[in-house]
Every structure is written in C-alpha cells, then in structure tokens.
Amino acid sequence: MTETRGGDRFFDRVVAATPGGEKLALCLQCGTCGGSCPSGPDMDHTPRQLFAMIAADMEEEVLNSNTPWYCVSCYYCTVRCPQQIPITDIMYTLKRMAVQKGKFKEAEAADFSKTFIGMVELYGRSFELGLATRYHLAHHPLKMIQMSGMGLKMLQRGRMALRPEKIKRLDQLQAILEKAKQLSAQTGGAA
C-alpha cells in the first residue's frame, strides 16, 4: 500500500489527473460499470473494484492491474453510470500512471489494446471477431474453444459480423487520428 501524506494520496492524484475525476468520490459501488463492460470477463478487477482499491490507496495493485489495458474505450460504462463518473477517462489516467511508473509491459492487455486501436484505425470501428481471434490465438488459444459457443450464438443473432466493415468517410477519421498522434508527440504524450 502507498504511504499517504496530506494531498499525496493516490486517490487525490488520480482525481487531479482526470478531467471530471472529482466525481470518483461519488461512486456508489453499484457495479453497473463492470456489468456493462464487454471486456469485463478478461479483467482481473472490475472497474468498481478498481475504484475501491484507488480509494484505499492501493497504488501498486491498481497500477499492476490489467483492467485499464482491457478497456476498449467504448464509453458504455460511462454512459450507464448513475453518478456520471468518467470511467473511461479514469482508465486512461491509470494507463498513463502505469507507464510513468514503469509498470507497463508488452503484455496481453497492452496487446489487446493495441489490436483494438489498430482495428479502429483501419476500419473506423472495432471488429470483434478479428479482435478476439487475434488476441486468443496469441495468448490463450485453448480459450477460443471455450468461447466458440458464445461466438456462434452471437453470429446467429446478428450481433457479430464475419467480416469487418469500414465506416463512411474513414479518411476523415484517419486524418483526425493522425493529427492527434502528431499533437501527442509534440507535447510528449503517449500516442
């Protein structure tokens, strides 16, 4: 656990580093965030659990968690949060803090995050079948067998596509993403 001195609490630093982060103090521990998360089953802690750990100043445990790295930035948790906590933005804050503290490793969760971002850059949206296939082939090939039943049900119900579809005006999104990378590089941020 992290030693705390006045305003040097881990909780305070997370709040200060996140736009709207002061709302974290309003967390009801309802679990809506974790129940809404498409990546929840792969996270070692739900967002709710992570927020309780942040409040308990468990900095090492939080920054070693894979949870922020599995966040696919869909904002579903943020939209559904009854307290309007900027959950996705907090996950970005935790990623930055983990990188700054040297906790970032080229590990499974980081690979998942990079694969997701690559698909968004290529198609303008996530391609779940491709994302799951690439991730599980690289890290948990036997888990693909366990998940095949769920995948078939999703295909039958039209909830998952067999091929990726590009968004309209993908070139405009790619230009925005490229500009964001340039700005990030100029300011010393992680692209």
Image (cartoon, rainbow, N blue to C red):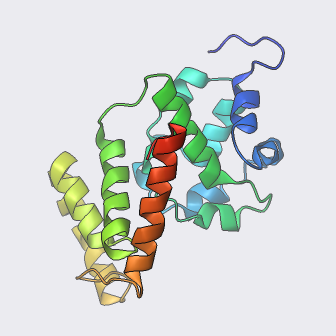
Query: As displayed, is residue 168 above or below residue 24?
Result: below
Q: Position of residue 70 (x, y in %)?
A: 43, 50
Q: Can see residue 67?
A: no
Q: Quadrant of residue 86?
A: bottom right
| Residue 37 pos. (x, y %) | 52, 60
Is 178 left, or right, of 31 in this rendering? left
> Residue 121 is drawn in which quadrant?
bottom left
The percent position of residue 92, horizontal first and vertical second, equals: 56, 46
Instruction: Say if 107 sits above or below 167 in the image.
Output: above
Residue drawn at the location 66% of the way across and 60% of the way down: 32
Q: Quadrant of the N terminus?
A: top right
- Snapshot quadrant of residue 49: top right
- In the rendered image, the residue lying farthest to the front is 186
Q: Is residue 136 left or right of residue 5?
A: left
- Residue found at x 30% / y 56%: 115
Residue located 36% across and 44% down the image: 109
